[in-house]
Image (tube, rainbow, N blue to C red):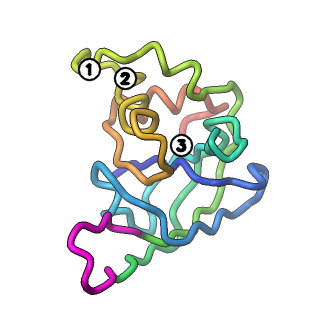
Amino acid sequence: MIYAIKADIRDPYSQEFVLTSQKTMYGGKNIAPGDRVFVFASENEGGQGLVARGVVTSAEAITRRPGIVRQTPRVSITIRRTELVQRPLGRAMLKPFADWSDGRPETELNFKFYRQATNKIVGLSEAAAAFLDAFFPRAP
């Protein structure tokens, strides 16, 4: 499967991203080593949106805390960066795509990342992954 993560990315040029205890939604809890992932530097943390594409090298589910009924699954992952983005893509560009039932990849990304402002790992459709691939110099 193909995933995307919006997180606090301090150095988008890093060869490796180590991200601990990340919230998951929309199938994100199933992320595993070998999966492709698109990396968004969270604008809430001063980032610029889509910054890189990579491959998951490790993924470990975080044990739920006892006594808490509703807990969002969390995962710690390491991503090896394979490409840097060539063109910008962030919240401002995706915000106009808010007709949640239009089936557009831009709308899927806006819905999964920006309807709620929290950072998270999400599963992507093939259409959304193909849309994001266009922001990189070559196909994966």
In the image, what residue occupies the spot 75% across and 55% down? 10
Residue 131 x/y as whole percent? 46, 26
User: Mark 1 sits on what residue?
Assistant: 103
Classed neighbour count for the residue bearing mark 1: other residues with Cα under 10 Å, few (<14), some (14–19), many (≥20): few
Give the total number of marks visible in the rendering.
3
Q: Which residues are magenta?
A: 64-74
Label 3: state its secondary structure: loop
Label 1: state its secondary structure: loop
User: Mark 2 sits on what residue?
Assistant: 107
Front-most of 106 and 86?
Answer: 106
Label 2: state its secondary structure: helix
The Cα atoms of the two marked residues, 1 and 3, are separated by 24 Å
34 in relation to 140, above or below:
below
Tell whether 134 sits left or right of 24.
right
State if disc 2 and disc 1 touch (CB < 8 Å).
Answer: yes
In the image, what residue occupies the spot 72% across and 42% down? 46
- Whether residue 65 is in magenta: the answer is yes
22 in relation to 99, above or below:
below
Q: What is the three-letter code of the residue carrying label 1? A: Gly
N-term mark: 3 or 2: 2
